Image (cartoon, grey):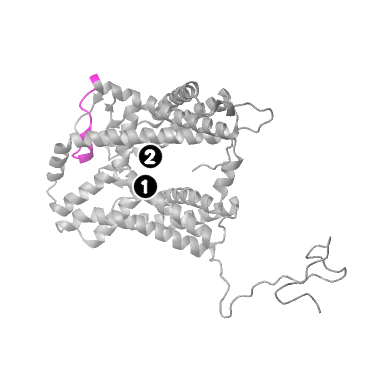
Amino acid sequence: MSPVTPDQPRRPAAGVAADTRPPGRARPASRVPAPRSGEAPRRRAPLPVAAGVAAGWAALTSWLPVTVVLGLAQLSEDAGSPAGALRTGLAGWLLGHGVPLETSAGPLGLAPLALAALAVWRLTRAGVHVSRAIGARDGRSPRQALTAAVAVGIGYALLGALAAAVVGVGGPRVSPVRAAVTFAVFGALSALVGALRTTGVSGLLARRSAPPLRDGVRTGLVAGLLLLGAGAGAAGLSVATGGGDAADMIGAYRTGVAGQAGITLVSLAYAPNATVWSAAYLLGPGFAVGTDTAVRTSEVSVGALPAVPLLAGLPRGPVDGFGAGLLAVPVLAGMAAGWLLARRLLRLAVEDRTVVGWGPLLAPAALAGPVAGLLLGAAAAASGGPLGGGRLAEIGPVPWQVAGMATGVVGVGALLGAAATKLLVRPRGPELLVQRKGHPGPRRDAPIT
């Protein structure tokens, strides 16, 4: 009687693998699950359709809030029509993307950065959706990411040109060509950010870049964001101390509750601009609120200003006394970024049982200065612009001055913070810090977040 039972399969002979088959007998083909009956295979969306839908949705979700805010004042006192409110919303939407408007009082080019940030976010999501629709998710293909971004930019450019043509009928003069080019660049660059993340190209580039470059970019961005945060705090404190004047300015418009709410929301849309101006003020170059004016820590020279609530927080004169401590804020921001850099490298060195040398530490700290300078210089360029002709033709900081000062101050601060951290911080477990010959060094395989 055979010892094999249904519950006890036959054991293979000694020295023979369980999956060994006699020569000449083919291995059975692996079974692939068949699609369910009645279920059609998932198709990829055509690129023009996906880009058009994504660009249109991004445009709608960024234009609608502008129309609501700008239409409050007009509709509150029957000062306008719904068609006029829609046209005004389109004009504000174009201005938020950096397209100048030619009015009877002169060019209007001071873009509200809050609206610009909203448009960037929506276009970034558009790049994500288009990349998924064409099947490029996690494909790590730069060509697919660039294709999705360019497609979104083209669709967005057509919408910008159409909006410029509509606004030009009975409203401010806007060049459709200028609007199309601006929207194409704006849309393509913003969508590229989302496409690079969705396709996995950003992580691939981060892993292939040199560790000092990765650490320097990260440290510079941290320092720049810390400076902008300090600028936001200083601007908010200034507006809070001048809250009475701001309330009087809002009440002087006599547009009703809805109109005053609209004016307040418009002021909030320009709050990021004030943040950048305040950061420029802390760095030293300051900013202008008109031709031949200057607002710096050492000098405040302004003339008659428009009744804008956001300008109620302007300083009255040069800083003195305890206010001089504001001059140390940019250096402290750079030192904080350098401290974070050194702590991270020291922690990785303890985990990998290596020693952090001065070169791998100071190289990214020095690179943080130019990175922060580029960030703040670009922010300064985007935050300024004319508010008509005459003396209000120059508003905002000078970009190259802000970039140069941020590069030097953040670079020095990051070097001081990193060097002081290495000298003063003693890592735990000194027996782990043994320099082993041929060790690959600290682990730096984490992508930039």
The numbered disc on residue 398 is none
Q: Secondary structure at mark 1?
A: helix
Cβ atoms at labels 1 and 2 below 8 Å apart: yes
Q: Secondary structure at mark 2?
A: helix
In the picture shown, does residue 299 fall above or below 389?
A: above
Magenta part of the chain: 306-321
In the rendered view, does 29 fall on the left or right side of 148?
right
Residue named by callout 1: 116
Residue named by callout 2: 382
Residue 32 at x, y = what percent? Answer: 67, 71
Q: Is residue 50 visible?
A: yes
Which quarter of the figure has residue 167? bottom left
Please name the amino acid that badge 2 sits on: Ala
Residue 16 at x, y = what percent? Answer: 83, 62
Please name the amino acid that badge 1 sits on: Ala
Residue at 49% of width from left, 63% of height from top? 50
Which quarter of the figure has residue 293? top left
Which quarter of the figure has residue 413? top left
In the picture shown, does residue 168 fall above or below 239?
A: below
Residue at 81% of width from left, 79% of height from top? 1
Residue 216 is a magenta residue: no
Sequence-first disc among 1 and 2: 1
| Label 1 CA crowd tier, 10 Å (few <14, some 14–19, many 20+) | many
Q: Is residue 174 visible?
A: no
Front residue of 429/379: it is 429
